[in-house]
Amino acid sequence: MAGKLIPRSGRCSGGRQGGRRGAAMAGLAAAALLGATTGVLAGAAPAMAEPVRGVAVEPALASAVSGRLLADQGEQIAATYDAPGFRPAAGDVLVEGKRASRDRNWVFGGSVVRMPGTAHGSPVSALFVGHRVDGRWRVELEGGTGFAALVRSAPAEVVPDDEREALASTAAPAAEEAGLGMALPWKRGQSWGSAGVHGDSGSSRPYNSIDFSGGDSRVLAARAGKLYRFCTNARWHLIKLVHDNGWTTGYYHTRNQTDKRDGAQVAAGEFLGQTGNELPCGGRSSGAHVHFTLWKGNRAVAVNGRTIGGWTFYEGSRPYSGYAERNGRRINLPGGGIVNYGADNDDNTPSATVRNKGGTVNLRSGPGVSYDVVGTVRDGDVVRIACTARGDELTGPWGNKNDVWDRLTTGNWISDAFVDTGTNEPVAPACG
């Protein structure tokens, strides 16, 4: 079943689903989720047992943040929250503090408009910085020049130095012509299915979202970036990555998530969570999947005509349709068989994850244990493979035997027995 898409599962669910059909789909989703969970993540990532503890946000700041979010994102909110009769108000905005200065005059956090249970898709969210001057709060949201200014001037206890430029870049994201530099959000070389191109709430514009499901169910970072969480009162959260080019990607419905905290650096291809039906910020879902969204600064951006993971995606005449195209091959959506070929700017160099049950793996100067140890990599590190050669056969952490050795782009060698490439065969050409 790997790579196949169960019909009408693995997608966000609209408010029209109900009665027996809704119950049947819920059962299908539960069965799919149970099957996907069993044995997949053993030892892969610790599960967060409790909600994230942030800092309290006083009512005046919460009011300022919610008012700003509803005003700045009013058009996108109206398009996304298409539930009949629902008009978002301040009470629908969840404001969460992540860090504060000792004098409480600076606060960094996240804000999100909760989705009603009749809506479907991924919520509108924004990071914020608040600065109190003469008793009044100045609030700026990610993607604006004011946000960049406050990020750069906030004390390090509120915005650490290693986060400043990534956050500030949301105000001046890279040009669209530069390419996204993104892989698909799963392991390179693995095949998944998609329910099609759509908006954050299905029919909402722009069509900036794609639902993906299948494979080993492990959702990975499409590009390196800083990780931030929203709706953290729930066990599993909405995860957003702020990339170094000012673009952001969202990952909704996932469970069994990484234990990395807000502001942590995440490598391209690093584990984020597992496909699921989690609804920490509200909404509806059926069939375990990840709702993958694309934003440029503070603007939702259509995926139409954009290349991700080696495929160029195109929207159809209706939501949850379209197709993916690569080298003349076309896959109509909904459909399966979408192989992740990696980022569009990585020169087709395969990447893979080191696996050794929490330990380290030696790097050597040649393809065998007789060569000098020149360094180590850790379990979970992502490496890029330039070419391969046959050498000493080693036994890996799963009892797997392999005589393939991978020469990394750094020039060092590692036994393929300790590298998760999805196959025991070479994934790169033979070294000359």
Image (spheres, rainbow, N blue to C red):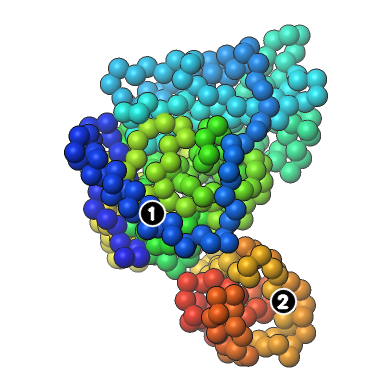
Alpha-carbon distance for marks 1 and 2?
36 Å
Q: Using the image, tell me which numbered label, if any, was put on residue 362.
A: 2
Where does the image place residue 297, in percent across and percent down from the top left?
A: 54, 36
| Residue depicted at x 26% and y 44% | 25
Residue where numbered disc 1 is placed: 34
Type of amino acid under label 2: Asn
| Residue depicted at x 58% and y 56% | 45
Secondary structure at numbered mark 2 = strand
Between 359 and 328, the one nearer to me in the picture = 359
On screen, residue 327 above or below 198: below
Q: Residue furthest left?
A: 20
Where does the image place residue 268, in percent across and percent down from the top left?
A: 57, 57
**Dividing the picture into quarters, in which one does residue 145 lie?**
top right
Where does the image place residue 115, in percent across and percent down from the top left?
A: 40, 28
Type of amino acid under label 1: Leu
Residue 294 is at least partly visible in this image: no
Image-based side of 303 in relation to 352, left or right: left
**Dividing the picture into quarters, in which one does residue 247 lie?**
top right
Between 75 and 85, the one nearer to me in the picture = 85
Q: Give the label, 1 or 2, closer to the camera.
A: 1
Q: Quadrant of the N terminus?
A: bottom left
Secondary structure at numbered mark 1 = helix
On screen, residue 99 above or below 191: above
Q: Residues within 10 Å of mark 1 (few under 14, many from 20)?
A: few
- Pick whichever of labels 1 and 2 is earlier in the sequence: 1
Image-based side of 212 in relation to 41, left or right: left
| Residue depicted at x 37% and y 23% | 78
Residue 50 is at least partly visible in this image: yes
